[in-house]
């Protein structure tokens, strides 16, 4: 995740499709397919509107089960907790 965080730009939004292996509290392995919607607070209004308007289209096209919104690359550190619903 740290490598991915280093790739995210500081001033531009991105969609990231992620298949992340998790071990559930029951001990079962799960590999959810999610979309990370990275929208930094420093990006311009035009980019914000463009990405916000296309978010559902991207979700439906990629057939992801969940969208996780992030405003900072550091939010990736808590991705496992978000996927587990904590």
Image (tube, rainbow, N blue to C red):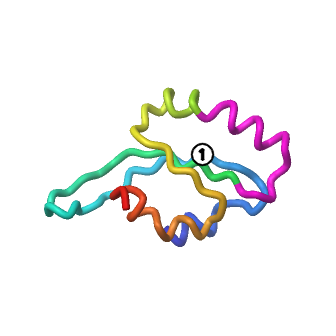
Residue at left offset 66%, top offset 58%: 71
User: Is residue 38 or residue 85 the one in the foreground?
Assistant: 85
Residue at left offset 84%, top offset 40%: 46
Residue farthest to the front, as pictured = 86
Q: Position of residue 9 (x, y in %)?
A: 72, 60
Q: Position of residue 59 (x, y in %)?
A: 51, 33
Task: Judge from the rendering whether residue 53 lies leftward or rightward of residue 69; answer left or right.
Answer: right
* Total count of labels: 1
Q: In terms of image quadrants, where is residue 63?
A: top left
Q: Kindly state the secondary structure of the residue where label 1 is placed.
A: strand
Residue bounds of the magenta highlight: 40-55
10 Å crowding of disc 1: few (<14), some (14-19), many (20+): some
Task: Judge from the rendering whether residue 84 lies leftward or rightward of residue 27; answer left or right.
Answer: right
Residue picked out by circle 1: 15
Q: Is residue 50 above or below residue 82?
A: above
User: Is residue 38 or residue 2 the one in the foreground?
Assistant: 38
Is 36 inside the magenta-drawn segment?
Answer: no
Examine the residues drawn in magenta and state their main secondary structure: helix
Q: Position of residue 14 (x, y in %)?
A: 65, 48
Is 46 inside the magenta-drawn segment?
Answer: yes
Q: Position of residue 2 (x, y in %)?
A: 53, 72
Task: Judge from the rendering whether residue 46 lies leftward or rightward of residue 64; answer left or right.
Answer: right
Task: Judge from the rendering whether residue 83 lies leftward or rightward of residue 49; answer left or right.
Answer: left
Q: Quadrant of the C terminus?
A: bottom left
Residue at left offset 33%, top offset 48%: 32
Residue at left offset 20%, top offset 57%: 29
């Amino acid at each position: 995740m740290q490598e991915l965080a280093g790739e995210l730009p500081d001033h531009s939004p991105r969609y990231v499709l992620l298949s992340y292996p998790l071990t559930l509290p029951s001990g079962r392995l799960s590999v959810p397919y999610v979309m990370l919607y990275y929208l930094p607070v420093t990006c311009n209004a035009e980019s914000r509107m463009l990405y916000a308007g296309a978010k559902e289209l991207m979700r439906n096209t990629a057939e992801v089960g969940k969208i996780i919104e992030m405003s900072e690359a550091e939010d990736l550190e808590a991705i496992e907790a978000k996927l587990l619903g904590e």
